[in-house]
Image (tube, rainbow, N blue to C red):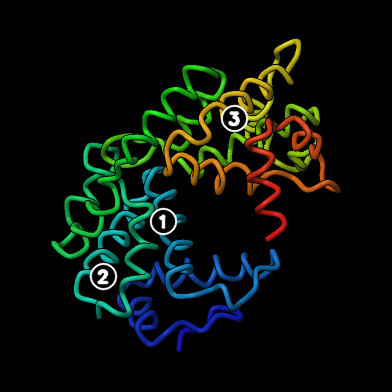
Amino acid sequence: MTRTGPWTGSAWWEHLARVVPLAGEVARSEVQAATDAGLDSELMTDGFVTELVTAELIARVREGDTAARDAMIALGAELEVGPPVVGEEVVSGYLIHVPSPGEPHDEITDTLGPRVRAALDQDRDHRNEPAVAAFLDRLLLAVPALRPLADEERYGYHNEVLAHPFLGDVVQREVALLTGGASLEMDDEWPEEDQAEVRRLYTSAAPDPSAEVRAVLGFLEAELGTDADVDNLIAVAFLEMLPYEDEPGAEIVEMLGAGLRAVLDRQREA
């Protein structure tokens, strides 16, 4: 087995690290960093470690590291012939960082075999349900300040907004507007550019930031009951993410309309 701190890779990952040495080196480093950060070792599955490894490799590729590019290509080749049962989780961990065709460094994508390329195409050929897509369009028209958040969650060949992550981001933003940013829990040790990006996405220079909160909640209240897929999206991605009474920004719950509040109450009574 390949020792990587507290994580011992499967026999298949041991083989992978042997035939792609840079992947093994990065795995050891990334797992140790995750361990030092307090991550539970039980979460360090083959797929999770592969995602860590490919994230680091693709970051190096973007910096012009040809060895990292070659390692990404070699990993793709190994995944093409890997056992389907063992490889499925790992293939997903790899593909999340592979460029789409037409994006920078898509020479990595061009080398994928048919099995892995089919998995990539299936994942990236993402389309929202028509009712959900129309709902998102109406939300962004009603509250244009949310467009930067939506753009952060665009994904796939069709540049669709990932509806659930986006609405989760909206919750964070609206709560942050009510708390003056305190709910964001930014660390002073974060790089300034990271702090600036959080402020750009989750704060507002408007004289009355709570006006946006009311606009979002009013929109969701009006949309509730118009479509089952939209109702589920609002319930799961927005209402379930709202703070509890002992958490920062809990006052947002008191601002909910009757329909939204009824759904939230049912959720929290369950």
Q: Is residue 162 left or right of residue 217?
A: left
Q: For the residue labelled by badge 3, is the local secondary structure a helix, a strand or a loop?
A: helix
The mark found on residue 239 in the picture is none
Quarter-of-image position of residue 19: bottom left
- Which quadrant of the figure has residue 117? bottom left
Looking at the image, residue 122 lies above or below residue 262:
below
Amino acid type, residue under disc 3 in the picture: Glu
Given residues 129 and 16, the one toward you in this image is: 129
Kindly identify the residue that appears in the image at 51 percent across and 44 percent down.
165
Local SS, label 2: helix
Q: Earlier in the sequence, mark 2 or mark 3?
A: 2
Instruction: Identify the amino acid type marked 2.
Output: Leu
Distance between the Cα atoms at labels 2 and 1?
A: 16 Å
Residue drawn at (63%, 49%) of the image: 240
Quickly name the residue at label 2. 79
Position of the N terminus by quadrant: bottom left
Residue 179, position in %: x, y?
Answer: 80, 31
Residue picked out by circle 3: 221
Q: Quadrant of residue 127?
A: top left
Give how far across and how far down residue 68 sits, in percent.
36, 56
Mark 1 is surrounded, within 10 Å at the Cα level, by few (under 14), some (14 to 19) or many (20 or more) other residues, namely many
Q: Secondary structure at mark 1?
A: helix
- Taking the view exactly as shown, the residue that stands out farthest to the right is 246
Locate residue 180 relative to residue 149 in the image: left or right: right
Residue linked to disc 1: 57
